[in-house]
């Protein structure tokens, strides 16, 4: 996984998260949890910036909804899998 893609996806998701949640500190624990989640995606070999962004945003959203890191990871993984499936089912142009 390209560290540039990983860092860019995390920065994108975190910046948007802070815009929606004005009371959150820049150094909130959710930021480090996001970095750990995206870094762990390297095991899958995923390095597509757009898909990493989707996974990062989904993770933060689910972390807020579920208040549980493990469940948020599973939900974000599911969202990523659905995006991968949808992109693989589209014919090449």
Image (cartoon, rainbow, N blue to C red):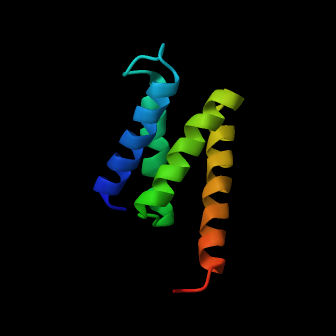
Q: Position of residue 47 (x, y in %)?
A: 41, 63
Q: Which of 53 and 46 lies nearest the eye of the viewer?
A: 53
Which residue corresponds to the image point at 62% horizontal and 32% vertical from the top-left?
63
The residue furthest top is: 23
The reply, left or right, for residue 7 in relation to residue 67 is left
The residue furthest front is: 93
Q: Position of residue 1 (x, y in %)?
A: 37, 62
Task: Give the total of numbered labels.
Answer: 0
The reply, left or right, for residue 54 in relation to residue 2 is right
Q: Position of residue 72 (x, y in %)?
A: 64, 39
Which residue corresponds to the image point at 65% horizontal and 70% vertical from the top-left?
86
Please, is residue 24 above or below residue 13 in the view? above
Which residue corresponds to the image point at 42% horizontal and 49% vertical from the top-left?
39
Q: Which of 93 and 86 lies nearest the eye of the viewer?
A: 93
Q: Position of residue 46 (x, y in %)?
A: 46, 64
Place residue 11 in its image quadrant: top left
The reply, left or right, for residue 26 in relation to residue 37 is left
The reply, left or right, for residue 86 in relation to residue 39 is right
Which residue corresponds to the image point at 49% horizontal and 31% vertical from the top-left?
17
Q: Which of 29 and 22 lies nearest the eye of the viewer?
A: 22
The residue furthest left is: 4
Please, is residue 38 above or below residue 29 in the view? below
């Amino acid at each position: 996984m390209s560290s540039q893609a990983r860092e860019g996806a995390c920065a994108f998701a975190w910046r948007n998260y802070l815009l929606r949640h004005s009371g959150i500190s820049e150094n909130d624990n959710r930021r480090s949890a996001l970095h750990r989640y995206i870094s762990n995606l390297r095991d899958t070999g995923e390095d597509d910036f757009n898909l990493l962004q989707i996974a990062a945003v989904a993770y933060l959203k689910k972390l807020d909804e579920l208040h549980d890191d493990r469940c948020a990871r599973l939900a974000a993984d599911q969202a990523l899998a659905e995006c991968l499936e949808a992109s693989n089912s589209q014919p090449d142009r």
